Image: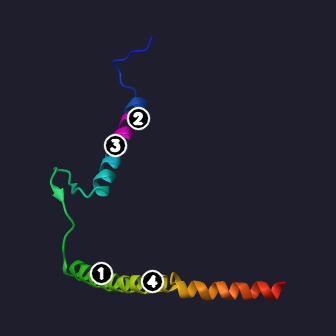
Amino acid sequence: MMDFGVITPAVMGIGVVAMSFAWVINTWIRVKYGYPLENSWGKAVYPQKNEDAVERVRLISQENAQLRAELGSMKDRLANVERIVTDSGYQLTHEIERLRDEGKVQ
């Protein structure tokens, strides 16, 4: 008969692996949703801010602003192209060209 009062090394190993897996999942969820990580004493760990990191954030912010301005310009250009394509004169010209091409084929 099996003695359930004794913890075998296999059961202990499974327990350690399960707790490690739970810790990894917990850390992944915290990182994914923006919660601060904790050190071994339960104190929140935030990234340190140094001059390089601040400069990098400033440069990325400038690039982001430039890209947003360029995107706005592209949206305006696309709106103009859509207006030209949906203009009735443009459609009329294409219809005339299509009818001319049909006449050449026959």
* Range drawn in magenta: 13-20
Q: Which residue is mark 2?
A: 14
Q: Is residue 21 left or right of residue 40?
A: right
Above or below — where is 9 with respect to 85? above
From the viewer's perspective, is the residue at label 4 or at label 1 nearer? 4
**Main secondary structure type of the part rendered in magenta:** helix
From the viewer's perspective, is the residue at label 4 or at label 3 nearer? 4
Residue 30 at x, y = what percent? 28, 53
Q: Which image quarter: residue 80?
A: bottom left
Decide which of tag 4 and tag 1 comes sooner along the chain.
Answer: 1
Q: Residue at x 53, y 84 (%)?
A: 88
- Is there a contact, CB below 8 Å, between mark 4 and mark 3? no
Q: Residue furthest right?
A: 106
Q: Residue at x 33, y 18 (%)?
A: 5
Q: Residue at x 30, y 57 (%)?
A: 31
Q: CA distance from mark 2 to mark 1?
A: 46 Å
What's under tag 4, amino acid-wise? Leu
**Label of residue 60 in the image:** 1
Q: Nearer the viewer, residue 81 or 62?
A: 81
Q: CA distance from mark 4 to mark 1?
A: 26 Å
Q: Is residue 35 left or right of residue 95?
A: left
Considering the numbered disc 3 on the image, is that residue within a helix, a strand or a loop? helix
